[in-house]
Amino acid sequence: MKKILIAGTNSGVGKTTISLGIMQALTKRNLKVQPYKVGPDYIDPSYHTFITGRYSRNLDSYMLEDEKIKYIVKNSSKDADISVIEGVMGLYDGYGIDLDDCTSSYTSKMLKTPVILVINAKAMATSAAAMVLGYKMLDENVNIAGVITNNVKSESHYNTLKEAIEKYTGVEVLGYFPPNKEFSLESRHLGLVPSVEINSLKAKFDNLADEIEKYIDIDRIIEISETEDFNTSFDLEDFIEKNKVNNKTIAIAYDKAFNFYYRENIELFEKLGMNIKFFSPISDKKLPKCDYVYIGGGFPEIFAKELDENKEIRSSIMNAHHNNTPIYAECGGLMYLGEKLEDQNNYIYNMVGIFKGCSKMTPSLKRFGYCLGEAKEDTILAKKGQIIKGHEFHHSIFDSQEECAYYMRKLKNDKVIDEWEGGYSKYNTLATYLHTHFYNNLDCISNFIERGCE
């Protein structure tokens, strides 16, 4: 089983650029590359998917137990030539300070995957060896099989780094990458701009792959990737058998404004026998004929004018709500289902209006990180008292007098460090800032399906 995990010493070290370049280089060699991302990111995986032509998968140890992560990897990589996992933050950064709590390093151990460590070697020589040695020694069960030195301007500088790192750490140096602004990707307040918005991506990534091939030993990376296989005890067969539906359709919002989804969430509906119909709240005039509606996260604030102007689709969604069609919306979807949206320039736009209130953009993150949602009442996803794991990550607030449907809690070391109320439920519609992976609590899908069969 061929697999590698590309990790950084810290965020901003160039891990994503190197990962994308390696994925593109492998793809240009006509290899089937299965991409993954550690943690709850939506944007980086959109680039992975664009490059490889295969859906990138999130490997999130907070929301999913080990066996479920193994199941995702096992099933999605079975017809791939090589799997490439992009880490999150620094190699040992996770939820708190436990080395095995939601870290890239733990994911590498769980999946028996060698790590390629990306370091920023600008203005460094032998000190780079001390950095690599520290990462190697902190957890000797992590297989750091190679190093890539980033921001290295000359071959002579690289040779010095390579000699020092290999002499003092015993870790192989696989190449370097020079500074190059041509390959930087545009960012906005939630991270990189999603790939669906960027023109000429193919040429950019092709050029990046060519540069990667010049400076990094791709042949050696492929050799290192040949590693031990693993098995999993998790299986969806019983759940699918018990919850299978016939002649049911779910309409899923997907366009420039809404494209934050865990791929497994969509595939779970497919496995349960549902017909998937995608629609655009920006350009379509009405909902497809459907039994359920799912509106994910994204950037409705960037496309608020277009969403406002499309009165027909907003009316169609409101009609579905009044007809008791189960509607589930996450984060950007919540903003869309409110009455109004106030963007960064204080312009106010009309939204669907199921929930009374206005989404207002804020200069800083209002919620950030993993949390739990406990249902205060029965909703389309949860019975009263049921808990759903997820994460919040938003630069907005929903200013509303509507009653909240969930008790929200953030825990650290099993202690509550923050709590608030969130999410809104009305009839068969639920909207919340909480992003969740359905595998973490399959009961939520049983509940959702049940509402559409009443």
Image (cartoon, rainbow, N blue to C red):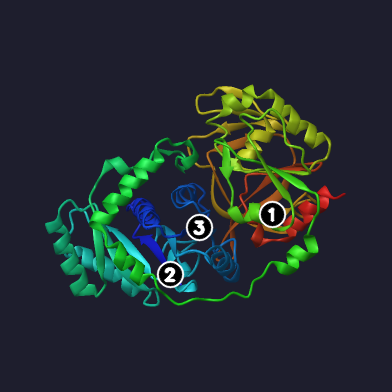
The residues tagged by marks 2 and 3 sit, at their Cα atoms, a distance apart of 21 Å
Q: Amino acid at mark 3?
A: Gly
Is any atom of residue 99 visible in this view?
Answer: no
Q: Amino acid at mark 2?
A: Lys
Where disc 2 sits, the SS reads loop
Where disc 3 sits, the SS reads loop
Where disc 1 sits, the SS reads helix
Q: Residue at x 68, y 33 (%)?
A: 338
Q: Nearer the viewer, residue 371 or 301?
A: 301
Instruction: Specify the quadrant of the image occupied by residue 187.
Output: top left
- Residue 415 falls left or right of residue 205: right
- Residue 233 falls left or right of residue 87: right
Q: Amino acid at mark 1?
A: Glu
Question: Dots 2 and 1: beta carbons under 8 Å?
Answer: no
Q: Residue at x 24, y 47 (%)?
A: 179
Q: Nearer the viewer, residue 362 or 247?
A: 247
Percent position of residue 234, x then y: 64, 71
- Residue 296 falls left or right of residue 443: left
**Which residue position holds label 3?**
39
**Which residue position holds label 2?**
2
Percent position of residue 277, x then y: 69, 42
> Which residue reaches farthest left?
156
Q: Residue at x 27, y 71 (%)?
A: 133
